């Protein structure tokens, strides 16, 4: 299948490599030729994972966004949500009928991409889909080298317009067999684990993060008090999903740490693989890191806003947003990805359902 992978992040390199190795013809786009030079010239990415270390050929690395998108059947954008507004506008003119765009994860970015296309006058029948996590536990170790310590096993995925879901997800499953359908794009956004796992880990580890040069929030930074807090925070997300009528499984984050019971999105033992890799023992600047500017500012603000809209109290979500705003000196809710800022807060439940089903 003709697949485009957009972006230069850890997950983008992992995706370009895995999808190429799986037999797809991959157009791999990244801004900036200088940072991309090793891939542009070598046309390969070196990968290390459970299968060993090897070079994987990349069919069409490019810095031309139109070249990457035009003619692609599936477009994968495994980038942080902080990139979505600018990249959605850049992509808007190029979308074509029948394309499927996959945002893993999305933070409701599927709606942002669709709206940007319509605002640009592009009326193509494109389906934008999002899931709850990046399909890879990955870190780049060089300009053309990525280490992947885990792969997604279950990817609950919702789409806008949801009326296209059956055809779109059948196509997407040829690229990511781990996906399974859920109701719509808002359901997909409410599966996003980033806003649940990362804000407690960075804020409840704020002291050691600012004291030590490097600290692993997933290893010594994950202690019983933090785990109990994370579970309580996740319960607020799940209450929102249940109140809106979205069906189980809700993929509670507790399953990520469990040794038995239901598998989480990465399957069994992923947390141990992550900590064993050592790749998450890192320097995190609390005022700058994506765990704050993406997962907290965008992820938690969205949960707070949707909770308010649905009539669900979210004291922990709001509390972490307040602490984060104090740490950063910014009003992260006001800056956030809220229904108010998206112009959707005035919709009724029925109107939201119609929007998710039919698109714009």
Image (cartoon, helix red, strand yellow):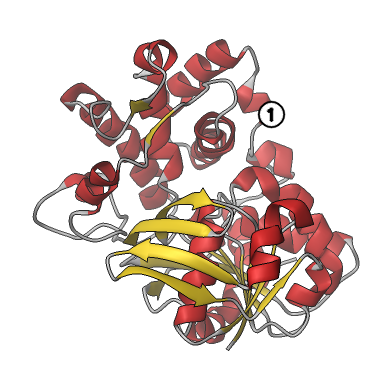
Disc 1 designates what residue?
Answer: 335
Residue most toward the left? 260
Say left or right for 355 vs 219: right
Q: Nearer the viewer, residue 201 or 184?
A: 201
Relative to 9, does residue 288 appear above or below in the rendering? Answer: above
What's the residue at 68%, 47% (across, down)?
A: 83
How many numbered circles are shown? 1
x, y percent for residue 293: 59, 31
Relative to 194, does residue 24 appear above or below in the rendering? Answer: below
Q: Nearer the viewer, residue 274 or 104?
A: 274
The image quadrant where one finds the N terminus is: bottom right
Q: Nearer the viewer, residue 15 or 328?
A: 15
Residue most toward the right? 121
What's the residue at 44%, 13% (across, down)?
A: 210
What's the residue at 52%, 21% (across, down)?
A: 286
x, y percent for residue 109: 63, 54
Is any part of residue 65 visible from this angle? Answer: yes
x, y percent for residue 342: 72, 44
Relative to 75, does residue 315 appear above or below in the rendering? Answer: above
Is any part of residue 32 visible from this angle? Answer: no
Say left or right for 248 vs 71: left
What's the residue at 18%, 54% (across, down)?
A: 269
Label 1 neighbourhood size at 10 Å, few (<14), some (14-19), many (20+)? few
x, y percent for residue 169: 50, 80
Circle 1 SS class: helix
Q: Nearer the viewer, residue 315 or 142?
A: 142
């Amino acid at each position: 299948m003709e697949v485009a992978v957009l972006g230069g992040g850890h997950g983008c390199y992992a995706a370009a490599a895995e999808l190429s190795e799986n037999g797809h013809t991959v157009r791999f786009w990244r801004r900036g030729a200088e940072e991309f030079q090793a891939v542009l010239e070598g046309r390969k990415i070196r990968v290390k994972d459970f299968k060993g270390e090897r070079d994987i050929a990349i069919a069409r690395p490019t810095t031309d966004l139109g070249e990457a998108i035009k003619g692609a059947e599936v477009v994968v954008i495994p980038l942080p949500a902080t990139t979505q507004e600018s990249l959605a506008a850049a992509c808007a003119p190029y979308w074509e009928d029948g394309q499927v765009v996959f945002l893993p994860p999305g933070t409701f970015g599927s709606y942002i991409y669709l709206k940007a296309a319509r605002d640009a006058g592009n009326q193509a029948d494109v389906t934008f889909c999002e899931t709850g996590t990046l399909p890879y536990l990955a870190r780049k170790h060089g300009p053309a080298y990525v280490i992947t310590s885990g792969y997604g096993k279950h990817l609950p995925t919702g789409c806008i317009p949801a009326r296209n879901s059956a055809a779109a997800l059948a196509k997407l499953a040829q690229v990511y067999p781990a996906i399974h359908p859920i109701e719509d794009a808002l359901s997909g956004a409410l599966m996003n684990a980033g806003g649940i796992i990362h804000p407690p880990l960075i804020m409840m580890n704020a002291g050691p993060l600012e004291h030590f040069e490097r600290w692993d929030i997933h290893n010594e930074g994950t202690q019983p008090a933090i785990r109990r807090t994370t579970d309580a925070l996740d319960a607020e997300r799940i209450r929102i999903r249940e109140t809106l009528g979205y069906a189980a499984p809700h993929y509670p984050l507790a399953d990520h740490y469990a040794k038995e019971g239901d598998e989480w999105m990465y399957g069994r033992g992923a947390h141990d693989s992550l900590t064993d890799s050592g790749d998450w023992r890192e320097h995190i600047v609390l005022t700058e890191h994506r765990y704050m500017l993406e997962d907290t500012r965008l992820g938690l603000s969205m949960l707070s806003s949707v909770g308010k809209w649905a009539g669900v109290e979210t004291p922990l979500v709001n509390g972490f947003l307040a602490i984060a705003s104090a740490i950063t000196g910014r009003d992260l809710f006001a800056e956030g990805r809220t229904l108010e800022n998206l112009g959707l807060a005035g919709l009724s439940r029925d109107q939201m359902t119609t929007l998710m089903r039919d698109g714009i």
